[in-house]
Amino acid sequence: MDYLKITSAKNLSGSIKISGAKNASLPLIAMTILAKNPVVIKNLPHVADIRTLLKLLSNLGASCEFAEDSVTVNTAALTQTKATYDIVKTMRASILVLGPILARFGHCEVSLPGGCAIGQRPIDLHLKALEQMGAKIEIHAGYVQATAPDGLKGCNIIFDKITVTGTANIVMAAALAHGITYITNAAREPEVVQLCEVLNASGVKIEGIGTAILSVHGTSGALVNIAPFAIIPDRIEAGTYLCAAAITKSEITLTNAEPKHLGAVLAKLEEMGCTFTLADDTITLHPTEVLKAVKIVTQEYPAFPTDMQAQFLALATQAEGTSIIEERLFENRFMHVSELQRMGAKITLNGHTATVNGKSELSGTDVMATDLRASSALVLAGLVADGETNVHRIYHLDRGYDSLEKKLENVGADIIRLKEK
Ligand code: UD1
């Protein structure tokens, strides 16, 4: 197992190239199940979750050919329809194959993902929507068994809650369904938008893209021809490096980024005193000497993302005054708090709200990553902590950050990946 050793960074400078978005890549890889041609996906990030999903597709019979930062996925020979526990347990987003496999083959089995570190994360909304489309669903021996021998049928789906992978799953199922599926209370995340845009460009008419009401015109089972496309930039990776710039009071430029997807994150950094120079695909953060406290509530896009909550919590430990950070999406997404406290942060937790009394002097020590974004919060804290910080269990971090230590090292951070003894 690897860990990261970080020595307090004085000042960083330079530029960081943002990779393709993990959370856009996952549904778009699952989407290749709907294709009649080999699909070329460019700007794919080198992260463990992508490898896991490609392995799942390979296990089912698909072939994947890799080039530097692209992959060609051919699902023509895909015959297996069961996503087994050994893979699903390592990545909940494996559930994304349920919609497209069921739509193409009329049956699918996916292991139930179980709980995870940040909360229960049920999949009831995915299943309820598929049932509305005519699927018969049974839960047996830890597996979702879904059948739709006569194909899925378009219908009116109103999600009780906004769900990102739930929306993606149903869009993919609806793409091959008979008739039109109307999805109300759909997720509007840029990653869902890209999935819809790629399908729309491939002949699956989708109206309302980027809004909360989608109409997906199904192809009645006909597979679609999907042209090559490039994954959008990772807005969470970009947000994390903006926090790295802000916490170390450094001017850093992000390239290959998409400022339009970062509205809420940039607004909060501005409230804290940072300023920006924005161009089409670059963002330069101009730091402030004195970070101001901030109030944050996590919500669905376009509001402030839960996937940036941990990083802002780390940043708030270096702000003057009292910051209040409320987590509304996941019930247990504050596992990083106790590790930050061990480094000297003054944080009190009350239910879903963390109150951060800044500014604290942090001291480097051994800390444990508990989930993907919690890991990057500990790295950020390590960049300003006095002495050395060792972040353990970084397999969480490797699930979603492409070459994090190399990117930070390139801008001057003292960070190294080492093997646990
Ligand atoms: C996706 C992202 C994840 C992000 C999250 C919220 C991917 C691969 N992952 O996760 O990084 O943190 O969106 O922006 O894109 N819910 C239910 N029943 C369901 C589905 C969801 O109750 O069937 C609840 C969840 O427990 C949660 C909320 O709805 O409280 C939102 O979850 P959801 O949007 O589904 O998250 P994911 O798609 O799993």
Image (cartoon, grey):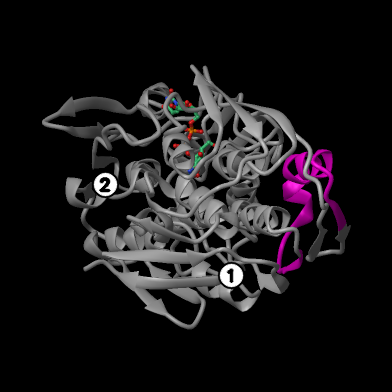
Q: What x and y, as percent, mark residue 288?
A: 83, 52
Q: Secondary structure at mark 1?
A: helix
Q: Is residue 211 above or below residue 176?
A: above
Residue drawn at the location 34% of the way across and 72% of the way down = 418
Viewer-proximal residue, 332 or 93? 332
Q: What x and y, as percent, mark residue 45?
A: 51, 67
Q: Amino acid at mark 1?
A: Leu
Q: Is residue 50 above or below residue 193?
A: below
User: What is the number of the mark on residue 157?
Assistant: none
Q: Residue furthest bottom?
A: 67
Q: Dot 1 corresponds to which residue? A: 408
Q: Residue furthest left?
A: 141
Residue 258 forms part of the magenta stretch: yes
Left/right placement of residue 241 relative to residue 22 reads right
Q: Quadrant of residue 120?
A: top left
Residue 131 forms part of the magenta stretch: no
Q: Secondary structure at mark 2?
A: helix
Q: Label 1: how many residues lie within 10 Å, few (<14), some (14-19) or many (20+)?
A: many
- Camera sees residue 298: no
> Quick check: is the Cβ at mark 2 less than 8 Å away from ligand 1?
no
- Camera sees residue 212: yes
Extent of the magenta region: 251-276
Compare marks 2 and 1 and give the one earlier in the sequence. 2
What is the distance, in whole Å, between disc 2 and disc 1 at their CAs? Answer: 31 Å
Q: Amino acid at mark 2?
A: Val
Q: Dot 2 corresponds to which residue? A: 88
Q: What x and y, as percent, mark residue 298?
A: 62, 30
